Amino acid sequence: MGKKILLFLFVLSVTSIMLNEKALANQRLPILLYHHLLPEAYIADNESILDNGMVVSQELFARHMEYLYLNDYHTITSSELRGFLYENQELPPNSVMITFDDGYLSNYLFAYPILQNFGFNAIVFTITGFMQTRDQEFNPDRTDMLSWMQIASSSDVFEFASHSHLLHTFNNGISGFVSASIDEARSDLILSQRRVQNRRVFSFPFGQYNRQLVDMLRFNGVDLAFTIHKGYVTRNSDPLLLNRFTIYSNTSLSQFQHIVRGNYR
């Protein structure tokens, strides 16, 4: 009888391990990408902004975050993502990652208080050469950038990482980070890494990359890099070519729900 009980417990233990491994292998993490936020009133009064799909209204962003909060979503940090990809750690149920590219002042003015209210965190990928030495007065007709003081004062919510230093340029459909020589790209990365809190995380300017740049990032200590390819991140994803879902001005709440529930195909 004792041997049968031991055998049963062994089979139960093996089955539990297999189920946990299967659940981990099947986890699909949505990583959300925002850029610039503005209150709806300012968007409605500016035709050029109306045509810019990257400008999401503060009110829509709040509805997105409220949905995550009311449905018990967990916003993960880069450290948790690293554990998932490199150490086979399981993510909490209903995990999602929130990211912002570029480092606009609007992230501080409009996203920060909403995220703070819901107890969420996010990563801001800053173009460090564009950050300001003093706070800028808000002007809805401009896309002003964060100041270093605002970066410091919002670090309870935001992780700050690199989106290049001065190579966030675009010419003939090619980003400056891609068109630069590998030595120029490396120098730019190192300058940017010196100015951010998290040197191990990077977002490709305009989502563009090549294998030489990926290898250069790895050699310089980057172990998580983000593209703008649409899709989920799984345990088998390349940590240096991570997918994200860009959120646009016309991304409705129902479409947002579809993405974060893992239903996008």
Image (cartoon, grey):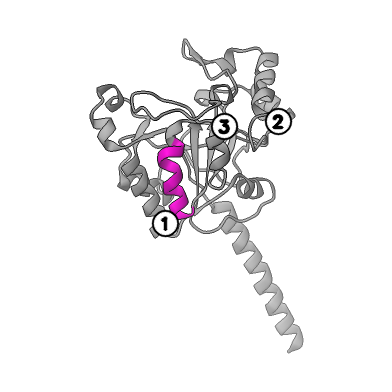
Q: In the image, which disc is placed on residue 218?
A: 2
What secondary structure is the stretch in magenta mostly built from? helix
Q: How packed is label 3: few (under 14 Cα within 10 Å), some, or many (20 or more)?
A: some
Q: What residue type is labelled 1?
A: Tyr
In the rendered image, residue 162, in percent from the top left (x then y), is placed at: 60, 30
Q: How packed is label 2: few (under 14 Cα within 10 Å), some, or many (20 or more)?
A: some
Viewer can see residue 228: no
> N-terminal of the two: label 2 or label 1?
1
Q: Which of 81 and 45 is in front in this view?
A: 45
Quarter of the view holding residue 152: top right
In the rendered image, residue 87, in percent from the top left (x then y), is placed at: 69, 50
Dot in front, 2 or 1: 1
Q: Is residue 135 above or below residue 186?
A: below
Residue position for label 1: 69
Q: What element carries label 1?
A: helix
Which residue lies most toward the bottom here?
1
Q: Is mark 2 on a helix, strand or loop?
A: helix
Mark 2 vs 3: CB contact within 8 A: no
Spatial CA distance of label 2 from label 3 is 27 Å
Q: Which residue is drawn at 61% across and 13% down?
A: 180
Quarter of the view holding residue 141: top left
In the rendered image, residue 71, in percent from the top left (x then y), is placed at: 40, 59
> N-terminal of the two: label 2 or label 3?
3
Q: Which residue is drawn at 65% across and 20% down?
A: 188
Quarter of the view holding residue 153: top right
Q: Which residue is drawn at 74% across and 28% down?
A: 219
Q: How packed is label 1: few (under 14 Cα within 10 Å), some, or many (20 or more)?
A: some
Spatial CA distance of label 2 from label 1 is 35 Å
Is residue 66 rendered to the left or right of residue 170?
Answer: left
Residue position for label 3: 148
| Region in magenta | 107-119
Q: In this view, does 50 lie above or below 85?
A: above
